[in-house]
Image (cartoon, helix red, strand yellow):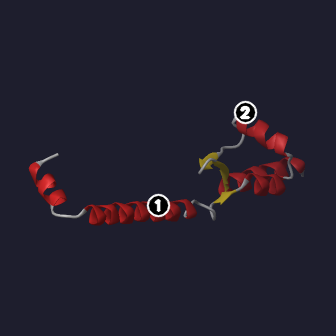
């Protein structure tokens, strides 16, 4: 700790120091919640949405992920799929089926 930091800390009371820490932690937590709530939703689909769109089972979806047939990204430990890639997969599936 530098001399300047010691002087600054010695000029505040323990209560003021506690208030400063509490405010900093609260701000950091609020910022984290904002970041988490801003996780992509418009350009990404949930596994359930993908299964419904492609008319596939959960087992098939996870086999495709494992085989690299469909790409997955994780946001807050939740799998998300790029809508554009899912729609491309749907178009390919429709072309093969017609």
Q: Earlier in the sequence, mark 1 or mark 2?
A: 1
Label 1 SS: helix
Q: In the figure, is residue 41 to the left or right of 10? A: right
- Distance in Å between CA atoms under marks 1 and 2: 38 Å
Label 2 SS: helix
- The one of 56 and 13 positioned closer to us in this rendering: 13
**Residue 18 in picture, x, y percent from top left:** 33, 61
- The one of 54 and 77 positioned closer to us in this rendering: 77
Which quadrant of the figure has residue 14?
bottom left
- The one of 34 and 62 positioned closer to us in this rendering: 34
Q: Residue at x 65, y 45 (%)?
A: 72
- Residue placed under numbered mark 1 in the picture: 29
Which quadrant of the figure has residue 27?
bottom left
Q: In the figure, is residue 18 to the left or right of 13? A: right
- Residue placed under numbered mark 2 in the picture: 67
Q: Residue at x 47, y 65 (%)?
A: 30
Q: Residue at x 31, y 64 (%)?
A: 20
């Amino acid at each position: 700790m530098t001399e300047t930091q010691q002087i600054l800390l010695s000029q505040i009371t323990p209560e003021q120091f506690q208030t400063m820490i509490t405010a900093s932690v609260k701000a950091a937590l609020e910022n984290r919640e904002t970041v988490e709530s801003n996780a992509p939703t418009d350009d990404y689909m949930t596994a359930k949405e993908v299964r419904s769109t492609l008319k596939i089972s959960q087992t098939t979806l996870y086999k495709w992920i494992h085989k690299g047939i469909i790409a997955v990204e994780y946001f807050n430990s939740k799998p998300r799929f790029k809508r554009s890639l899912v729609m491309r997969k749907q178009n390919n599936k429709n072309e093969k089926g017609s």
